Image (cartoon, rainbow, N blue to C red):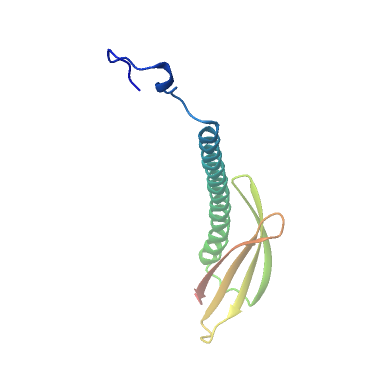
Amino acid sequence: MRREGGHRSVAAVGVGGFTLIEVLVALAIVAITLATGVKAAASLRGNAERMTEVTSAQWCAENQLTGLKLARQFPGVGDSDFSCDQLGRSYRGKLVVRPTPNPNFRRVDAVLANEAGEPVLTVSTVLPRF
C-alpha cells in the first residue's frame, strides 16, 4: 500500500524478529546439540580410562613374563598368583603355565584383573627350555 508521494503506510511496514515457535525450535536444536556433545565427551573420558587401565595392566603382564624369560628356568606346569601396582592401580594376576605339543616349550598366559576382580587383559607367550 502506497500513498501518494512514495511513502509507506504504517500498516504495510512489518515488525522484524522471530516468532515464539522459531525461538523454541532454535532452543530445541541447541539443547539437542549440547546433550550430544556432553554424551560424546563422557564416552571419550570412559575410553581414555579404559585405555589407561589396559596399558598399565599390560605393563604388569609384560613385567611378569620378562621376569620368567630373564630367570632362564623352564617353568613348571601350573598356576601361580601375583599382584602388581602400576599408575596407582592395583591388579591381581595369575600366571597359567601349560604344556605344548613340543615338550621343549611351555605356553604361559598372564591373566590380569582389576581390584574389583573384573578381567582386564590376557597376554600369552611361549617359553623355550633353556
Furthest-left residue in this view: 5
Numbered circles on residues, count: 0
Looking at the picture, tell me which residue is in the foreground, 47 or 36: 36
Q: Position of residue 6 (x, y in %)?
A: 28, 15
Quadrant in the rendering for residue 68 = bottom right
Q: Is residue 122 above or below residue 20?
A: below
User: Is 47 placed left or right of 84 in the picture?
Assistant: left
Quadrant in the rendering for residue 36 = top right
Furthest-right residue in this view: 116
Q: Is residue 39 above or below residue 16?
A: below
Looking at the picture, tell me which residue is in the foreground, 93 or 9: 9
Residue appearing at x 51%, y 41% in the figure: 33
Furthest-bottom residue in this view: 101
Furthest-top residue in this view: 5
Q: Quadrant of the N terminus?
A: top left
Q: Position of residue 35 (x, y in %)?
A: 57, 42
Q: Position of residue 92 (x, y in %)?
A: 68, 58
Residue appearing at x 53%, y 87% in the figure: 101
Q: Position of residue 47 (x, y in %)?
A: 54, 51
Residue appearing at x 70%, y 54% in the figure: 115
Looking at the picture, tell me which residue is in the foreground, 67 or 60: 60
Looking at the picture, tell me which residue is in the foreground, 86 or 11: 11
